[in-house]
Image: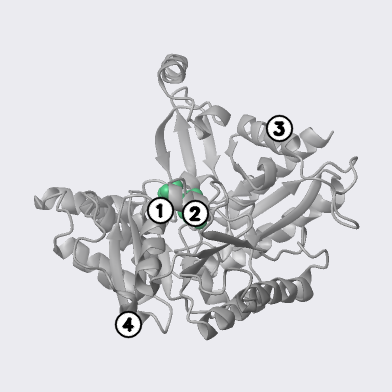
């Protein structure tokens, strides 16, 4: 059955398929970290629906929440009408919000994808400020619709100004650490102060507290606080895109919690729907400037997603899964760091909580920046992904030229499973490096 399904789908589906190319499997059953293919093969799934499955596949509390709605006879599709299910989701979501936002928050249901919520957030700050410029960062990913894509650097847009996102390994200023972050913040500040730069008056700034698709690049907490000061002093709304970092993944419930920064706007999706499509924007009440109907969408009332999402948010909060992600993530990253010393093709291991990346490089080629790391190398990363699959481990690729192997395991992963994941990954790297 597996071969036939793969053959028919690759003949009939668009060339736009992405994951299906690198992962020629046909999942038929899944539980927790494990996926089973139609041919009976089993995999540890560290792709987790691109970071969607905070509780892994088919978690009992998620299934129970979905079944409860189905059995209740409640309408499944209600546009944006109020329902008990939406009430419960909103209550649970508001419990988790950062201080400073929690008591003055408005939630806007968008839908159903992360990119839809990004579009709404960009349009909101433009409407609220009457301005049009958007500040975004190098290496960012916000989605595939036009506005989100422009903020990601994928579609040229004169309204978007790109700013340096600090990082140690490939520091845009060649110094890394606190100094590199300070230079990045100063860059932003001077651009905004320079009346001739054309960007002193933007509508808002959008950033990921940990860049995900960009190759797992955690923002430094000091830089986040500087950026917050710079934007607050100029009344520039700060949009935190927590589509991938949210719901405990990085070790705090929302990743802005690491720095204590309170954004003006938060974009949330992926894990908030408990594996079903759901996307919202949350913002301070004074930004709620919409005229009724100024931003709509048919599918923003998915009752099953809200029920699955409420159950997920509650489970993560009540079981301290963010703290668990912080502790386990530290241990996993610590063990993976040994690969940097053992293999020249492993450039850097980095991450925050259970958002982990291993960047591959070509140690034979000279750096493109003086004193910098070797160039990123997509070939070994792709080879490691294939070698992992042969060992029953599913990993994602991201980053510059897809040179970063990414792990996004569910927050429910056990210590034993984490060890199995690391063993298989280390084994795959050793095979590719040999
Ligand atoms: N923002 C971030 C930070 C993301 O990681 C993603 C998806 N990877 C998106 C936005 C877009 O979400 P979606 O694919 O659901 O449109």
Mark 2 C-beta to ligand 1 under 8 Å: yes
Q: In terms of sequence position, does the residue under pointer 1 or pointer 4 come before the other?
A: 4
Q: Which mark is residue 383?
A: 3
Mark closer to the observer (4, 3): 4
Q: Nearer the viewer, residue 141 or 122?
A: 122
* Mark 4–mark 3 CB contact (< 8 Å): no
- As helix, strand or loop, the secondary structure at mark 1 comes to helix
- As helix, strand or loop, the secondary structure at mark 2 comes to loop
Label 3 crowd bin: few (<14), some (14–19), many (20+), radius 10 Å: some
Label 1 crowd bin: few (<14), some (14–19), many (20+), radius 10 Å: many
Mark closer to the observer (1, 3): 1
Give the residue number, with chain letter if any, for mark 4: 104
Q: Position of residue 432 (x, y in %)?
A: 78, 34
Q: Which mark is residue 53?
A: none
> Is 273 drawn above or below residue 388 in the view shown?
below
Give the residue number, with chain letter if any, for mark 1: 114
* Mark 3–mark 2 CB contact (< 8 Å): no
The alpha-carbon separation of the residues under discs 1 and 4 comes to: 23 Å
The alpha-carbon separation of the residues under discs 1 and 3 comes to: 30 Å
Q: Position of residue 263 (x, y in %)?
A: 47, 75
């Amino acid at each position: 059955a597996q071969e036939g399904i793969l053959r028919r789908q690759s003949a009939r589906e668009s060339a736009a398929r992405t994951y299906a190319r690198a992962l020629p499997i046909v999942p038929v059953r899944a539980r927790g970290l494990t996926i089973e293919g139609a041919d009976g093969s089993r995999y540890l799934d560290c792709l987790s629906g691109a970071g969607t499955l905070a509780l892994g596949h088919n978690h009992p509390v998620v299934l129970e929440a979905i079944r409860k709605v189905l059995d209740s006879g409640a309408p499944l599709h209600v546009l944006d009408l109020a329902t008990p299910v939406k009430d419960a989701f909103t209550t649970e979501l508001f419990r988790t919000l950062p201080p400073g936002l929690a008591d003055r928050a408005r939630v806007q249901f968008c839908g159903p994808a992360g990119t839809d919520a990004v579009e709404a957030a960009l349009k909101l700050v433009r409407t609220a400020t009457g301005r049009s410029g958007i500040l975004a960062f190098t290496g960012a990913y916000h989605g595939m619709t036009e506005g989100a894509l422009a903020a990601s650097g994928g579609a040229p847009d004169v309204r978007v100004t790109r700013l340096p996102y600090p990082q140690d390994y490939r520091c845009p200023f060649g110094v890394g650490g606190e100094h590199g972050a300070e230079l990045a913040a100063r860059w932003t500040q001077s651009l905004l102060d320079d009346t001739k730069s054309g960007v002193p008056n933007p509508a808002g700034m959008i950033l990921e507290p940990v860049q995900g698709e960009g190759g797992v690049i955690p923002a430094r907490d000091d830089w986040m606080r500087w950026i917050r000061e710079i934007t607050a002093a100029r009344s520039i709304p700060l949009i935190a895109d927590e589509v991938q970092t949210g719901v405990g993944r990085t070790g705090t419930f929302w990743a802005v919690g690491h720095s204590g920064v309170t954004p003006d706007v938060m974009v949330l999706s992926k894990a908030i729907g408990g594996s079903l499509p759901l996307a919202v924007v949350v913002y301070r009440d004074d930004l709620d400037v919409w005229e009724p109907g100024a931003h709509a969408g048919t599918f923003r009332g998915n009752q099953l997603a809200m029920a699955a999402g409420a159950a997920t948010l509650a489970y993560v909060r009540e079981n301290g899964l963010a703290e668990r992600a912080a502790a386990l993530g530290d241990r996993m990253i610590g063990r993976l760091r040994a690969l940097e010393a053992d293999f020249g093709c492993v450039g850097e291991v980095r991450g925050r909580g259970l958002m982990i990346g291993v960047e591959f490089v070509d140690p034979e080629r000279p750096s493109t920046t003086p004193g910098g790391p070797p160039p990123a190398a997509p070939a070994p990363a792709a080879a490691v992904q294939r070698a992992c699959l042969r060992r029953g481990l599913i990993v994602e690729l991201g980053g510059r030229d897809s040179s970063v192997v990414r792990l996004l395991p569910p927050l429910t992963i056990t210590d034993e499973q984490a060890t199995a994941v690391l063993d298989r990954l280390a084994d795959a790297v050793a095979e590719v490096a040999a």
